[in-house]
Amino acid sequence: MDFIAAGYNDAWSELFPLVPGLTCCQAQLDNNAASELYQRIDLILTLGNVEAQRIALFGSDPSTRTSGGLWPSDHAGVAAQLAVENPSED
């Protein structure tokens, strides 16, 4: 199912329409020196009276690598602050 076609909103694209927000995929052993993230497959989707206020990627910056040089994961994490709006009462 195409969630966007079904009316869901992609929180990252709403807040950062010109930034790719890559989340996938580091090398299998997670020990690559430079980030190899090349696509965005980890999404936060909203529907209805939900608005994304902030969103961030975690584990995509080289500074997040362990002292042994490993990336935290093969994917970057995505977290968002969402606001649920009350529907207007008539």
Image: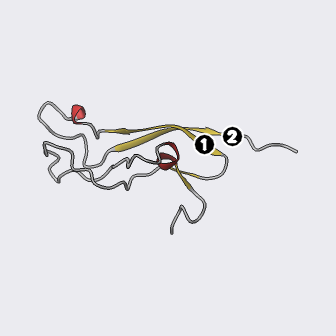
Per the rendering, the mark at residue 86 is none
Q: Residue furthest bottom?
A: 1
**Picture quarter with the C terminus:** top right
Type of the residue with mark 2: Glu
Q: Which residue is mark 2?
A: 85
- The 10 Å Cα crowd at callout 1, few under 14, some 14 to 19, many 20 or more, is some
Q: In the picture provided, is 53 more to the left or to the right than 72?
A: right
Give the total number of marks visible in the rendering: 2
Residue 56: image location, x then y, percent: 41, 38
Residue 27 in percent (x, y) is at 17, 52
Q: Tell me the colour scheme of the image.
A: secondary structure
Instruction: Give percent across and percent down for residue 68.
Output: 11, 34
Q: Is residue 25 above or below residue 57?
A: below
In the shown orientation, is residue 20 left or right of residue 27?
right
The residue lying at 76 percent from left, 44 percent from top is 87
Q: Amino acid at mark 1?
A: Glu
Residue at mark 2 to residue at mark 1: CA–CA distance: 8 Å
Q: Residues within 10 Å of mark 2 (few under 14, many from 20)?
A: few
| Callout 2 secondary element | loop
Nearest to N terminus: mark 2 or mark 1: 1
Disc 2 + disc 1, Cβ < 8 Å: yes
Query: Residue at 80% across / 43% down in the picture?
Result: 88
Residue visible at 40% across and 43% down?
78
> What's the residue at 14%, 50% (across, down)?
29
Q: Which residue is mark 1?
A: 51
SS for dot 1: strand
> Hey, which quadrant is residue 38 in on the image?
bottom left
Q: Position of residue 5 (x, y in %)?
A: 56, 65
Give the residue at the far front of this rendering: 18
